[in-house]
Image (cartoon, rainbow, N blue to C red):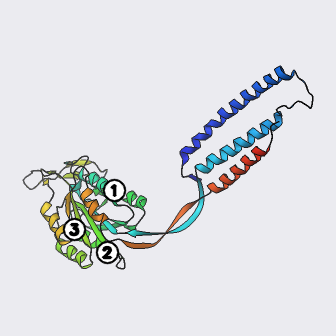
C-alpha cells in the first residue's frame, strides 16, 4: 500500500487522547449521578446509558480513523493511463568528459550542469524531454518523455568514468540528439547543449547541419570560469587521481570555448548563455515562448487510489453513531 499524503496519518495519534477524555468524562458523569440521584433506579429518571455511550464513542472513533485514512489517500493495485499534453520537445545533451570534473565551479562543472538542467526543466515544465550524454562518443540515455523522475534518475547516474570513449565530440552529440525527435510533432524542437565547449574531435559542422535540416533549434550553455583550471584524471571509483599534463609536463588548463558555443547557437537559431549561479532565467523565458504542440500516447501504470472506500465507510459509521442515543 502507498499513500499520497502519509503525514496526515499522524493525526491518528489523537485517538489515545480522545479515549482518555472519554474515560474522564465517564467518571465525571458517574459522580454527578451519585450526587444528584443518590443511586435512584426509578425509570422516571433519565440517565446516561453506559453501554450506549461507549458504543456511540467507539463508532465515532472508527469513523474518525477511516476519515483520516481517506484523507491520506491510500493507493494499491495498478491503474493504466495514457498521458496527453501540450508543449515543446527538448533534448538535453550533457557533456560528461573528464574536463567536466574541473573544479573551477563548485563542486565541479558536471554537478553544476546537472543542477542547471533540473532548474531549466522545472522552470519550463509540461514538456517532453530526452537526455543524451556525450564524451568521445554520444549515447541516448532517455527518449522523449514527460516522466521527469526517470529523467532525473539517469541524469544522476552520469559520471565520466562510466563512458569508455573519452574526449568531447559535440558533433556526434548533436547528431544523436537530433535522432530522438518525432518528425510528426507540431511543436518546437530544441537541443540544449550543456558543455565547456572544448571539442577535441572536430566534426561539429556535420552534426550542426544535420540538426538544422530537421528544423531543430540549438541553445548552448557554457560551463566553467574564464580563468580555467587543470583537467583532472578520474579513477574507477570516481575520485581525482591526478591532473593531465602536456608533453612538457605542464598541467593542461581547460577553459570554456565561448566562441565555438556562440557559433553553434547562432547556426542553430538559438542562443548562448554562460551558467553562473544557476541563473537560467533568460533561456527559460525564450523556451516558454516557443510554439507548443500536442503530444500523447505514452502509457503508464500507476497505483489506483482507494480513499473513497474509507471515506464512505467513515461517513456510514458517523451516521450510525449519531443515531445511537446515549440516554
Q: Looking at this rendering, what residue extends furthest in the left direction?
A: 248
Q: Earlier in the sequence, mark 3 or mark 1?
A: 1
Tell which tag, 2 or 3, sits nearer the viewer: 3
Which of the two residues, 318 or 160, is positioned nearer the viewer here? 318
Q: Find numbered disc 1 in the image and state the secondary structure of the residue it sits on.
A: helix
> CB of mark 2 within 8 Å of CB of mark 3?
no
Q: CA distance from mark 2 to mark 1?
A: 22 Å
Tell which tag, 3 or 1, sits nearer the viewer: 3
Q: Quadrant of residue 116?
A: bottom left
Tell which tag, 2 or 1, sits nearer the viewer: 1
Q: CA distance from mark 3 to mark 1?
A: 20 Å
Q: Is residue 186 above or below residue 65?
A: below
- Residue at horizontal 58 percent and vertical 52 percent from the top: 73
Q: Looking at this rendering, what residue extends furthest in the right direction?
A: 42
Mark 3 lies on residue: 270
- Residue at horizontal 66 percent and vertical 44 percent from the top: 65
Mark 1 lies on residue: 118
Q: CA distance from mark 2 to mark 3?
A: 19 Å
Q: Quarter of the image containing the C terminus?
A: top right
* Residue 126 location (% of width, % of height): 39, 63
Q: Is residue 158 visible?
A: no
Using the image, tell me which numbered label, if any, was put on residue 177.
none
Q: Earlier in the sequence, mark 2 or mark 1?
A: 1
Q: Is residue 14 left or right of residue 224?
A: right
Mark 2 lies on residue: 179
Q: Earlier in the sequence, mark 2 or mark 3?
A: 2
> CB of mark 2 within 8 Å of CB of mark 1?
no
Amino acid at each position: 500500500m502507498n499513500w499520497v499524503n502519509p503525514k496526515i496519518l499522524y493525526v491518528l495519534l489523537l485517538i489515545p487522547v480522545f479515549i482518555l477524555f472519554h474515560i474522564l468524562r465517564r467518571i465525571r458523569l458517574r459522580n454527578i449521578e451519585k450526587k444528584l440521584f443518590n443511586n435512584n433506579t426509578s425509570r422516571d429518571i433519565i440517565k446516561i446509558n453506559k453501554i450506549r455511550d461507549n458504543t456511540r464513542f467507539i463508532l465515532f472513533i472508527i469513523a474518525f480513523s477511516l476519515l483520516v485514512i481517506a484523507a491520506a489517500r491510500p493507493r494499491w493495485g495498478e491503474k493504466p493511463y495514457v498521458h496527453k499534453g501540450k508543449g515543446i520537445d527538448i533534448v538535453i545533451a550533457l557533456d560528461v568528459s573528464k574536463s567536466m570534473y574541473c573544479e573551477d565551479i563548485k563542486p565541479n562543472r558536471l554537478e553544476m550542469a546537472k543542477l542547471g538542467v533540473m532548474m531549466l526543466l522545472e522552470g519550463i515544465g509540461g514538456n517532453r524531454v530526452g537526455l543524451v550524454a556525450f564524451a568521445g562518443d554520444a549515447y541516448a540515455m532517455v527518449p522523449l518523455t514527460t516522466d521527469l523522475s526517470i529523467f532525473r534518475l539517469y541524469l544522476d547516474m552520469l559520471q565520466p568514468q562510466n563512458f569508455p570513449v573519452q574526449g568531447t565530440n559535440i558533433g556526434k552529440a548533436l547528431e544523436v540528439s537530433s535522432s530522438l525527435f518525432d518528425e510528426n510533432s507540431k511543436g518546437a524542437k530544441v537541443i540544449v547543449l550543456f558543455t565547456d565547449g572544448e571539442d577535441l574531435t572536430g566534426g561539429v559542422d556535420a552534426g550542426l547541419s544535420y540538426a538544422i535540416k530537421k528544423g531543430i533549434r540549438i541553445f548552448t550553455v557554457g560551463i566553467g570560469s574564464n580563468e580555467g583550471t587543470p583537467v583532472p584524471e578520474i579513477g574507477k571509483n570516481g575520485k581525482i587521481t591526478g591532473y593531465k599534463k602536456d608533453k612538457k609536463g605542464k598541467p593542461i588548463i581547460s577553459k570554456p570555448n565561448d566562441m565555438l558555443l556562440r557559433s553553434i547557437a547562432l547556426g542553430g537559431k538559438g542562443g548562448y548563455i554562460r551558467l553562473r549561479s544557476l541563473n537560467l532565467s533568460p533561456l527559460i523565458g525564450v523556451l516558454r515562448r516557443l510554439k507548443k504542440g500536442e503530444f500523447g500516447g505514452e502509457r503508464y501504470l500507476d497505483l489506483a487510489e482507494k480513499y473513497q472506500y474509507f471515506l464512505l465507510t467513515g461517513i456510514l459509521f458517523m451516521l450510525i453513531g449519531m443515531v445511537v442515543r446515549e440516554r
